[in-house]
Image (tube, helix red, strand yellow):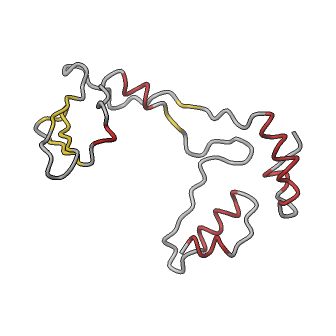
Amino acid sequence: ILKKSYKVSFVSSIYELARVVETSSNTGVNKAQLVSTHDGRVIVPVYDWCTFLGQYFKKITNIKKYHHFRFSKDEPSVVYCREYLTSPEQACVLLKDGAVIPPVSVLPQKINPEGLSDERRNYLHREIRQFCKPGTEDLVAPVP
């Protein structure tokens, strides 16, 4: 449904894209959620989960080759992996130290977006601005 609406819409900004998403369904099932604004204001924060969880958990070697995973409440630090449904299970212990688990009430550090490089801003202004709808030029391709 969204693809059909997007195809017939002239979208020049993230706000217009959000409107297309919101109006693409008669029943209102499609919802747009902006994660940041054109001026860099963060709406949905991003956290450094890799560094935070890396303190407590091991990586599963060759995880991309596995297609089936099973967890058990009886063994919370173990994941059982299979390449295929008929393959034998392999148990992988995830915790580096079974006695140390991540604190539940602590979040990782926030990652602040860097924004566009000068080169990218110049490109948008030089090459893309001319194709923007009137009134959206400064949102999409402002003067660097």
Which percent across, then down, holds residue 98? 19, 22
Q: Position of residue 102 (x, y in %)?
A: 31, 26
In the shown orientation, is residue 56 left or right of residue 112? left
What quarter of the picture does the C terminus occupy? top right
Q: Nearer the viewer, residue 62 or 121?
A: 62
Q: Residue at x 60, y 46 (%)?
A: 43
Q: Is residue 74 above or below residue 131?
A: above
Q: Nearer the viewer, residue 127 or 84?
A: 84
85 to 21, vertically: above or below: above
Q: In the displayed image of the protein, which residue is found farthest to the bottom? A: 26
Residue 139 in the image: x percent, y percent? 79, 52
Q: Which quadrant would residue 41 be assigned to in this image?
A: top right
Q: How many labels, in total?
A: 0
- Is 130 placed above or below 3 here? above
Residue at 69 percent of width and 48 percent of height: 37
Q: Quadrant of residue 92?
A: top left
Q: Is residue 138 left or right of residue 59?
A: right
Residue 109 position in % (x across, y down): 50, 27
| Residue for point 70% across, 36% down | 115
In the image, taking residue 47 as reference, residue 73 lies left or right, namely: left
Residue at image coords 82%, 53%: 128
